[in-house]
Structure formats: structure tokens, C-alpha cells
Image (cartoon, helix red, strand yellow):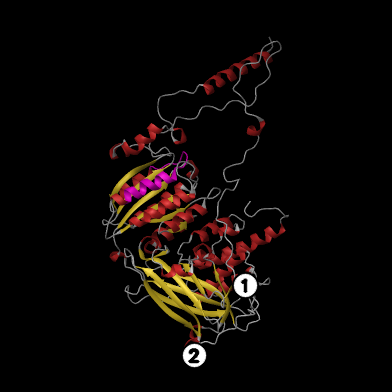
Amino acid sequence: MTRLHIAALAAASTIALVAACTSNPPNDGRPEAGAGATAQDAAVAVTGITSEERDNVVVTGSLVAPPSPPPPAPPPLYAPPPPVGMAAPKMATVAPYAQIAPQPMPGDVNRDTYRDVEINAVKVVAEEPVSTFSIDVDTASYSNVRRMLNQGYLPPQDAVRIEEMINYFDYEYALPKSKDKPFETTVKIVPSPWAEGRQLMHVAIQGYDIKPDKRPPLNLTLLVDVSGSMSDQNKLPLAVQSLKLLIDQLTEKDHVAIVVYAGAAGAVLDPTVGSDKAKILAALERLQAGGSTAGGEGLRLAYSLAKQSFQKEGVNRVMLLSDGDFNVGINDPRALEDFVSRERESGVYLSILGFGGGNYNDALMQTLAQAGNGMASYIDTLSEGRKVLNDDLSGSLFPIANDVKIQVEFNPARVAEYRLIGYETRILNKEDFNNDKVDAGEIGAGASVTAIYEITPVGSKAVLNDPSRYQAPKPMPEATANEFAFLKIRYKMPGQDTSKLINRPITAADQVSSLTSAPESTRFATSVAAYGSLMRGDPYLAKTFSWDQVIELANGAKGKDEFGYRAEFVQLARLAKSAASQQALKPAGGGVGQ
């Protein structure tokens, strides 16, 4: 027998031995982590472990499990032919070509999900003089879009929510003099930089702030997604790092509990006083990702735990940290929305912190935040985690008003047309404004809300709609002839069911002759609105309006910029300009963000 035949026999024997091992892996009786855990294993993880036992194990996607054994060796993909006259050895089944060929890596197929939203249309004041919407202090869209621009491509248009981009920034509006009247208003009317003959009406409300030593106690339940989809460094590891910045701000009057969910849901930290930071941080350090995603079950358990330790004089909040990829148990968006809507009646708020990309379910996260009296942020970097959970802690966690609604009635003698820029998912019916049963947005301590209308003055050549044939404009009373519009704000104090009203006329005194002479806050907010409008493909922008004008406008309104957020915005506008140029050079059919 030749040396070649001997070598072939040895190789064949080795292959058969490996195949036998892989087809019958050892079983030491321990439950596997992740999706392979049995229902009994999950039940033990949820209810059958003491706090002392829990401290000595790793928390994984199956909630509580010992470390998994190393995986068996993979089956060989190729073996040399047997010697002449000898039968081929039995081998492990080799996968068909489709599985041994290069496969897409996680993130290659983009499964991010966004709500399909149409840009607000132009309204004729003579026909629809009243605009009503719920406030929105979410910022998720800004940082999510930043992630995509930093990766070198423009975001899908539905990922761009202009109101969330504008409200990402602090504009240093005038503060209320007392919390008895929790809001101060700021209004400016300036020429539009992107449409000749039109104007922008910049409307802002600023909430009162609270000193750190005066804030109410916090009863916080952290609901952390530890499913397999959260294993990337920009997901669960980043979530844990960000939460450490939050834990650093807690005191002995606060309480924290931690619930995790993957194939099932379970509590890994019972309500613990905020000053016991070592215990809280140790629980966070044990979290590891693995398994499927039963997000609905996690929400149910988190609300239950929050209500068990409810503080009547404090703020009770569930904070969900996830990519929104719910795929087990209650995962129908409508069912989840209904559940969260019912739970908000208990007085427990819901915060949403989104992570990651490639399978980020933005549509679901937004739905849950709006239904749960909450706010939605997106954490793409540790710096963003610090902004949301440390620097802006009061605005993120401590509400000063619930169900805040804005209504603007335009004067047809001064304004022919208007459109609200952004807030497409927050539009309310006119009658909803005075109906205290209709839910609206919440605002935190020290937070502000900015809205921008584009208006067309009567007599302007920029009017888009033909005048009515049968409805002649009515003369205005002299008392209101100087008014462009009338602003009304309705809100409820936390824990109250009856709303209060603030109103003021918007007059010629609020008008500025040129954008360059407008306050810095108005100029910078306008640049952010233009940035979002260009990414949205806004049909109402002049074709000559460009990214260079956005950059120039923002550069002239950066102000002192203590944390560098405005300087970063200018760089993002430059990235957007480059990405838009590259996309324009692609052949037809190339999808955004692919």
C-alpha cells in the first residue's frame, strides 16, 4: 500500500470520528442559554432563584444560566477521495452550496423599520384656520440619522422627523418666573430662507427647571433587552455603559429594579435603594445577550414591578432599552400599544432608549413611547448616553406637565396659507384640544419645545392655492387686524385630570425684518429645519436651496456651544452634502442606505 493510500485512510478515519462527535454532542444535563432553554428553565429563572444565588451566575438571554459549553467542531466541508476499491467513509451531512458559499453578515440586509409618513400639506387659512398638535420632546431621529450619516449614507426619508431634530438642541429661551405658570412662550416671524415670498413663524415654549436637590424621588424599573439581537457592541454593551452614567446620579431617595427579557422575562434586581450603587452596577455587569425576544412579556413584568413599589409623591417610570426587534410572545404592535395605553393610567411613565441598526424597529419604539406618556431617544454613542441620562437627566425623567397640546388659529386677513414643518405623527383634530380625555405629549423639567410654521402672507405671489370663487374674505375687527395668529397651550399638572390654558396673540411686534437680524435661537432652529427638509425631499423648498446654505446659516448661529453639539451639527450637514452627491451619482434603482 502506497504512502498516499495510507494518508488517505488516516484522513478518512479522522473525518468519520469528527462526524460521529458532531452528530452526538455530549449532554451534561445543563440547560442551554438562549432560545434553546426550556419553559421550565425560564420559569426557574423568573421565580425560583434567590437574590444570593442570582449574584453568583451570569444573566443571559435565557435569563439565568451557567456558561454554555464550547461548541462542537464544525463538520468538514471537503475530504480526499478514498483509495481505489475502498468504500467512501461516512461523513457528516454537508450543507448544500448555498450555505457554504459566502453568506450575508448581520447588518448586510437592512431590516430597520420606520413608519410611512407624508409631509404636512399646505392649508388654506380661509378653509382651515386652526392647527392643532401634540408636543414632542423626543430626540431619537436626530441621533439615529447621525449614525447613518457617519456610516456614509443618507437615511431613509421616513427616518427623518424634523421636530425631533429641532428639539434635540437647547435654545436658552426665557424661563418661566414660577412653576405656577410652567411655560414661557417665545415667538418670532422671519423671512423664509428657502422660499421667496413666504415667512417662518418660530413658536417655542420653555418649561421651568428644578434644582437637583429639589427633584422628587425616582422609582425606576429598567427593562433591558438581552436577546441575541442585542449582542453587538453598539447595543447591550453600550446600554450598560450608558446606564452606569444614570446610576451615578441616583441618591438614597431613589429606587431601581432591573427586569430582563429574551425568550422569557424575569427580574434580576429587586427594587434597590439608589445609593447602593455597587449592587446595582454588579447586576448590570452580569447581563449578556442571547436568545429570542419576548418584549411584550418584559413590559408586562416591568409595569407590574413598578406598580408594586409605586411612590405616590415621586416619579414612577419604566425605561425600555432595546432595538425593538420583538419576535416572541406579544409582538403585535397594536396589542402592545393597547397594553401600554392602559398601563399609563396607573401613573407609570414609559421611556424608550433605542440601540443599534440593521434590525432597529423605530416604528414600534415610537408607538410605545407615544402611548406610554413617555419620551424616545436613540443612543448611538456613549456621548449620547451621557447627554440623555446624565446631562439632561431632569428633562428626560422628571415631568412637569402632561398632555401638552398646542393650537394656533391663523388670521385670514394677514395669512393666506400655512403648513406645519414636522410633527406629522402628532397632529390632532381641532376638537381634541379642549378634550381632556385625549392623550398628548409630556414635557420634562427644563425642557423646551420648538415648532416652525411656514406661512404665506395675504397678497404674496408665493400663494399656491387659487382664491375661492364663492367665499369672499371677511373684514377683520380693528382689535385683531394686527394679529398674525392666536397661540393657545393646554396642559395638565402631573397627577391631575383637568387641563389649564395659556394663550397669547402673535402680532406684528413678533416680526423681524430679516433672518440675519433674528435671534440666534431662531436662526439655528431654522438651519436644523432646513437640514431635515432637504433629507425629507421637501417639495416646498426652492430647487436652488442647497446644503451650503444650511451650513452657512448654522455656522452663523452656533453661539457659545458649550458641549459642541452645534459644531457637530455643521459637520453632519457636510456629511449629508457628500452623501447626497454620491447618491446622485448612483445608477437608478440604488436604495437609500443599502
CB atoms of marks 2 and 1 within 8 Å: no
Query: Does dot 2 land on a helix, a strand or a loop?
Result: helix
Residue 460 at what x, y percent from top left?
A: 63, 82
Quarter holding the N terminus is: top right
Range shown magenta: 286-306
Q: Give the residue at mark 2.
A: 478
Q: Is residue 349 left or right of residue 121?
A: left
State the residue at coordinates (69%, 53%). 590
* Among the two numbered marks 2 and 1 on one chain, the one whose residue lies closer to the N terminus: 2
Amino acid carrying label 1: it is Gln
Query: Does dot 1 land on a helix, a strand or a loop?
Result: helix
Residue 378 at what x, y percent from top left?
A: 48, 56
State the residue at coordinates (59%, 22%). 92
Residue 562 at what x, y percent from top left?
A: 45, 69
Residue 299: within the magenta? yes
Q: Residue furthest front?
A: 470
Q: Residue furthest bottom?
A: 478
- Residue 581: which quarter of the image? bottom right
Q: Is residue 172 visible?
A: no
State the residue at coordinates (35%, 44%). 283
* In front of the other: 199 or 229: 199
In the image, residue 458 sits, relative to residue 366, either above or below, namely: below
Q: Is residue 327 left or right of residue 178?
A: right
Q: Give the residue at mark 1.
A: 549
Q: Label 1: how many residues lie within 10 Å, few (<14), some (14-19) or many (20+)?
A: some
- Residue 488: which quarter of the image? bottom left
Q: Is residue 332 visible?
A: yes
Residue 176: within the magenta? no
